[in-house]
């Protein structure tokens, strides 16, 4: 009898131990499944569209690569220069002018410095050169002209006497079109024409009006001066390059009317 009870007791212990082992193994498996599900949910929250390994690494660090860095937010990526370019902002009287743009004002100032000596001398003495969209001209033609010569200082309503009398306006559109140098020469030529309006020719006539007749108008005269000062862009002239006779005429005009 004793042996029978001992055998039964051992059998019960074996069954009980097996039950404990199975229970623990099942619990570990359930725990592993729960943890895996949580990680998948977090990954989905971080990147609801397409998940990529590169995105995960991007969100955890900001690594400079060839002088750039990528922002930490994987959903709104910026490629950032590690070298901040210094932005020089124009500060001066033009900022209060209606239509002033200013993005290219400092570049425009440099272009004025590079003008042919005859034009530069006239500009520096009497003319404002403004990077902007002349508002009255805008109302006339429906868009910002490349360039405007405003002798009287015309405000957006068309009234005269604004602070920008005797001014050249070069818009951002001229810069975007890559024609700014020739546009500047064209408008500076209008300034030269206007500021020499009382010049007397060797024949004792108004030299400016004679030039209008010779070149068939003020705009054509300005375009001829663009070519004379080694520009290339013409909008009104249709005759092509200057002839030797035209060059001689302009030589005389500039000599007599500007002293150069």
Image (cartoon, rainbow, N blue to C red):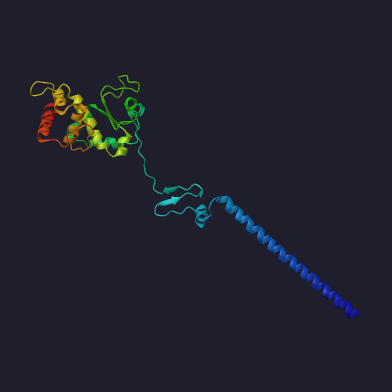
**Quarter of the image containing the N terminus?**
bottom right
Q: Please give the name of the residue rendered at 58% of the width and 54% of the height, measured from the top-left corner.
A: 43
Left or right for 1, reference 78: right
Quarter location, residue 110? top left
Q: Please give the name of the residue rendered at 16% of the width and 28% of the height, measured from the top-left corner.
A: 215
Percent coordinates x, y for residue 232 in the rendering: 21, 38
Left or right for 114, reference 47: left
Left or right for 211, reference 57: left
Is residue 180 visible to the viewer in this orientation of the structure?
yes
Asked if residue 230 is positioned above or below residue 23 in the image, the reply reads above
Left or right for 142, reference 212: right
Percent coordinates x, y for residue 180 in the rendering: 27, 36
Asked if residue 203 is positioned above or below residue 106 in the image, the reply reads above
- Viewer-side residue, 161 vs 226: 226
- Viewer-side residue, 43 vs 86: 43
- Viewer-side residue, 216 vs 37: 216
Q: As drawn, which residue projects farthest toward the left? A: 203
């Amino acid at each position: 009898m004793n042996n029978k009870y001992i055998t039964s007791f051992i059998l019960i212990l074996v069954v009980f131990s097996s039950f404990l082992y199975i229970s623990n193994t099942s619990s570990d498996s359930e725990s592993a499944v729960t943890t895996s599900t949580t990680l998948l949910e977090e990954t989905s929250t971080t990147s609801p569209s397409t998940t990529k390994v590169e995105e995960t690494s991007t969100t955890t660090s900001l690594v400079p690569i060839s002088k750039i860095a990528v922002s930490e937010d994987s959903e709104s990526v910026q490629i950032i220069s590690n070298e901040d370019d210094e932005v020089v902002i124009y500060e001066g009287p033009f900022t209060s002018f209606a239509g002033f743009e200013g993005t290219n004002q400092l570049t425009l100032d440099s272009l004025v410095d590079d003008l042919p000596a005859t034009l530069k001398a006239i500009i520096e003495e009497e003319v404002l050169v403004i990077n902007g969209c002349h508002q009255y001209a805008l109302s006339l033609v429906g868009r910002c002209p490349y360039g405007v010569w405003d002798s009287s200082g015309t405000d957006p309503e068309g009234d005269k006497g604004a602070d920008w009398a005797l001014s050249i306006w070069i818009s951002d559109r001229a810069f975007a079109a890559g024609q700014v140098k020739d546009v500047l020469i064209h408008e500076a030529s209008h300034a030269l024409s206007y500021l020499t309006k009382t010049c007397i020719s060797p024949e004792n006539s108004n030299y400016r009006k004679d030039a209008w007749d010779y070149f068939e108008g003020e705009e054509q005269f300005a375009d001829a001066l663009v070519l004379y000062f080694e520009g290339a862009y013409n909008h009104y002239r249709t005759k092509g390059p200057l002839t030797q006779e035209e060059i001689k005429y302009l030589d005389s005009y500039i000599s007599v009317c500007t002293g150069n």
